[in-house]
């Protein structure tokens, strides 16, 4: 399709607040630690099977969400009503449509809605939860253990001693360096945009491709052991098995470089994938890390079926922005130094 | 008898029965089938040649990095090309030679850039094929490169990319992959052999035995070459227990190389 | 071309927390808030790359000299899902770009608004402005 002079993207997209959402069906299944749904019942869904008998999770998915990880301080309930959740989604869409005040810092940004990168143009499953965390029941991260507090202080001190954010490439955020993003994790959590995933299943494997950073985990289902303890990977060592309709993926052998919410390299992560209807996947994870928290905690977020294709996210290859940021910081310092020198010896 | 040994002997027998030559004459081996009735290429594969240094025949040569001595010297290797050399246009050949002379600065592999096609297939690391009726994925070790091969709903490349846009179909026992939409940034090897964004690669994967794929690729680029040229090689199945693709996230290994000169100088 | 003035509010009460707009890098680190520009040029290339696409323009300065500029935009991935391709934007298209210039002083900028010569938004994402 070739629109020669005008890209009629607007005519292809129907960003009406309701049509891009599908509700996470509130089935009566129970999960660990009191993860109830809002109470209305729905038919139990059985996913179709792949030829080798796995429940079929395949397709392109989006985990775009507006639900925060932790429950906001002024919210006490676990679930919004459907109307409240829809209202919140509409408010976010309106927020994203507003242009920013010229001359403000927020205005130094491209118009992301023009590129379809706002949440209202993404596939998003409506989530009635008031937070992604459902255990502890207050929807917030558990307290830090003693070691967790010590490590957090150590990290804060290390950050300070490293200097400014733009002093060196290694000081920049991992996402800006195109090394790892929240969407990769693990656990896999959506960001502002490009929250695309592709799941494929072959005998003995489940493959998860994360669009951003073209990251792939090929998860073996044959019960093989984890990598040896001295071998650490950014996305760890991951092993999967089926429990009924749910794919359970256990991950160890992480590093402390990504440090999800401050986690240590000894974090053990359990992810659970269950298809709850044709268009919705429930993604749940449990974090166990006594080196950081006093108890395990769990969260869940619904994924919505999306259209492809996923396009190559060659982030590092196209990372002009990182170069410009560092060069810009050095240029500013040079200007400031020259100005200071002029002030010292005016001619 | 150990399972792997049994397998290896079966392979040798299978090889003896399937006649293979670089000229491409094969007695067709019938691979076990995937659920949809197509040849099953699922598995972990790896090339075993020295083409990653130079796709043309080449003698051993020193590393451009003194301190790496023999550990990074160029290993000798035969050509993987039908007709031995790449048919460059004269100006393109000059550019190739310039690339070679400046390879330390210019080779995209050094900067952990995605390797492109066909280079990804003969880098000296394993890659995994995950096969389905709609998509066939190829997941490479180096830089976590990945290719999506669209088996139905063939589209034109929406934009240029490092690994190209691949449309595939089955031709009997052969997986045919037609790839376009390349940018002009990748090389074919460490010797500076290059292409433009007009690159068009047609690959053929055919099972030669249970644990071998015959891999052939025809490379076309009217901006750079006087005619299409063809490479071929075997891909070997990684048979050891628990073979897996491990992480080779090299971005953090090259940051200092690429951005180190932009570090803030300590103030006096 | 008038830029809409609005307040980016912070939601409270029942509403969910304000969602972050800027994800992985702060543009105000790359581009200078004190160097706004308004350029008119012809497109020579649209690099549909990640993490951000880049529009290359030939811009005539006051003396009539053609100066190449590079303008940062959004990731093309969502547009591609919506059917946009490298053929959707023709080389030579005249564009008007309002934005902020790079801090390193080079002819680069972030394209705050990308418009066609007739004032319409380049990609009509969401509702038409």
Image: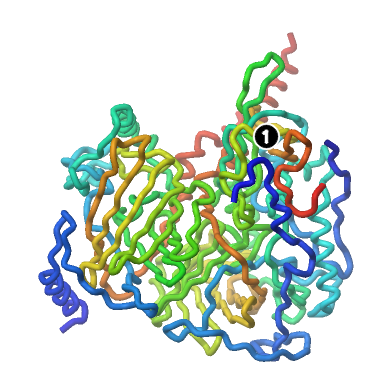
Residue at horizontal 26 percent and vertical 68 percent from the top: B237
Figure colour scheme: rainbow
Nearest to the observer: residue A24 or residue C96: C96
Q: Residues within 10 Å of mark 1 (few under 14, many from 20)?
A: many
Indicate the chain on which mark 1 is placed: C
- In which quarter of the view is residue C61 placed? top right
Q: Position of residue B4 (x, y in %)?
A: 21, 77
Q: Say above or below: A309 vs C114.
A: below
Task: Look at the image and tell me whether residue B112 can be seen.
Answer: yes
Residue at horizontal 32 percent and vertical 68 percent from the top: B44
Relative side of A110 to A188, left or right: right
The residue pinned by badge 1 equals C109
Nearest to the observer: residue B210 or residue A88: B210
The image quadrant where one finds the C terminus of chain B is: top right
- In which quarter of the view is residue B5 placed? bottom left
Q: Say above or below: B124 vs B223.
A: below
The image quadrant where one finds the N terminus of chain B is: bottom left
Q: Position of residue A2 (x, y in %)?
A: 60, 47
Relative side of B57 to B155, left or right: left
Residue at horizontal 72 percent and vertical 56 percent from the top: A118
Q: Say above or below: A203 vs C63.
A: below
Nearest to the observer: residue A330 or residue B250: B250
Q: Secondary structure at mark 1?
A: strand
Q: Position of residue A253 (x, y in %)?
A: 46, 69
Q: How many marks?
A: 1
Q: Position of residue B142 (x, y in %)?
A: 39, 55
Task: Look at the image and tell me whether residue A158 can be seen.
Answer: no
Residue at horizontal 35 percent and vertical 71 percent from the top: B42
């Amino acid at each position: 399709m070739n629109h020669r002079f005008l890209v009629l993207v607007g005519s292809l997209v129907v960003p009406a607040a309701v049509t891009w959402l599908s509700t996470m069906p509130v089935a009566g299944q129970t999960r660990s630690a009191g993860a109830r749904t809002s109470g209305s019942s729905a038919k139990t869904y059985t996913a179709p099977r792949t030829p080798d008998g796995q429940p079929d999770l395949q397709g392109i998915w989006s985990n775009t969400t507006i639900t925060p990880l932790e429950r906001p301080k002024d919210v006490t309930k676990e679930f919004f009503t459907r109307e409240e959740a829809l209202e919140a989604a509409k408010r976010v869409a309106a927020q994203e449509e507003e242009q920013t005040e010229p001359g403000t810092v927020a205005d130094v940004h491209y118009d992301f809605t023009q590129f379809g990168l706002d949440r209202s143009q993404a596939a998003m499953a409506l989530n009635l939860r008031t937070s992604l965390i459902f255990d502890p029941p207050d929807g917030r991260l558990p307290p830090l253990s003693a070691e967790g507090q010590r490590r957090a202080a150590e990290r804060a001190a290390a950050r300070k001693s490293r200097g400014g954010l733009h002093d060196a490439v290694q000081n920049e955020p991992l996402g800006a360096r195109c090394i790892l993003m929240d969407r990769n994790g693990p656990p896999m959590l959506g960001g502002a945009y490009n929250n695309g995933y592709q799941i494929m299943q072959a005998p003995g494997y489940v493959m998860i491709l994360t669009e951003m950073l073209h990251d792939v985990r090929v998860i073996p289902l044959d019960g093989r052991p984890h990598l040896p303890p001295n071998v650490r990977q950014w996305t760890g060592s991951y092993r999967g098995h089926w429990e009924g309709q749910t794919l359970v993926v256990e991950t160890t052998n992480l590093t402390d470089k990504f440090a999800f919410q401050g986690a240590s390299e000894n974090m053990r992560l359990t992810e659970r994938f269950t298809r709850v209807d044709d268009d919705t996947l429930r993604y749940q994870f449990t974090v166990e890390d006594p080196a950081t928290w006093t108890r395990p905690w769990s969260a869940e977020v619904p994924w919505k079926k999306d259209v492809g294709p996923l396009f190559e996210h060659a982030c590092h290859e196209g990372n002009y922005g990182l170069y410009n940021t560092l060069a810009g910081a050095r240029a500013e310092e040079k200007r400031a130094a020259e100005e200071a020198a002029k002030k010292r010896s005016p001619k | 008898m150990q399972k792997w040994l049994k397998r290896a002997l079966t392979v040798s027998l299978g090889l003896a029965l399937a006649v293979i030559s670089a000229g491409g004459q094969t007695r067709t081996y019938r691979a076990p089938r995937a659920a949809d009735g197509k040849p099953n290429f699922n598995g972990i594969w790896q090339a075993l040649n020295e083409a990653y240094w130079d796709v043309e025949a080449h003698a051993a040569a020193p590393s451009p990095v003194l301190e790496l001595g023999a550990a990074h010297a160029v290993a000798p290797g035969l050509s993987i090309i039908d007709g031995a050399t790449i048919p460059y246009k004269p100006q393109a050949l000059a550019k190739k030679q310039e690339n070679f002379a400046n390879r330390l600065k210019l080779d995209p592999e050094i900067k952990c850039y995605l390797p492109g096609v066909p280079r990804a297939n003969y880098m000296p690391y394993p890659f995994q094929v995950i096969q389905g009726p709609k998509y066939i994925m190829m997941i490479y070790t180096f830089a976590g490169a990945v290719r999506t091969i669209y088996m139905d709903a063939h589209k034109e490349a929406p934009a240029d990319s490092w690994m190209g846009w691949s449309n595939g179909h089955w031709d009997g026992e052969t997986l045919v992959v037609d790839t376009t939409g390349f940018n002009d940034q990748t090389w074919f090897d460490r010797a500076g052999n290059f292409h433009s964004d007009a690159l068009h690669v047609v690959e053929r994967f055919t099972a030669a035995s249970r644990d071998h794929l015959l891999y052939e690729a025809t490379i076309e680029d009217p901006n750079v070459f006087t005619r299409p040229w063809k490479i071929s090689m075997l891909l070997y199945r990684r048979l050891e227990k628990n073979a897996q693709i491990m992480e080779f996230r090299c971005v953090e290994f090259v940051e200092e190389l690429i951005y180190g000169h932009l570090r803030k100088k300590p103030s006096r | 071309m008038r830029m809409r003035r609005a307040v980016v509010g912070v939601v409270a009460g029942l509403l969910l927390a304000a969602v972050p707009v800027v994800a992985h890098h702060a543009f105000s680190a790359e581009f200078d808030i004190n160097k706004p520009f308004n350029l008119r040029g012809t497109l020579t290339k649209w690099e549909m790359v990640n993490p951000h696409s880049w529009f290359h323009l030939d811009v005539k300065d006051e003396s009539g000299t053609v100066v190449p500029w590079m303008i940062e935009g959004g990731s093309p991935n969502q547009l591609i899902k919506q059917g946009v391709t490298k053929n959707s934007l023709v080389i030579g298209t005249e564009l008007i770009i309002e934005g902020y210039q790079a801090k390193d002083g080079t002819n680069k900028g972030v394209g705050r608004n990308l418009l066609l010569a007739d004032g319409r938004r380049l990609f009509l994402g969401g509702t038409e402005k």
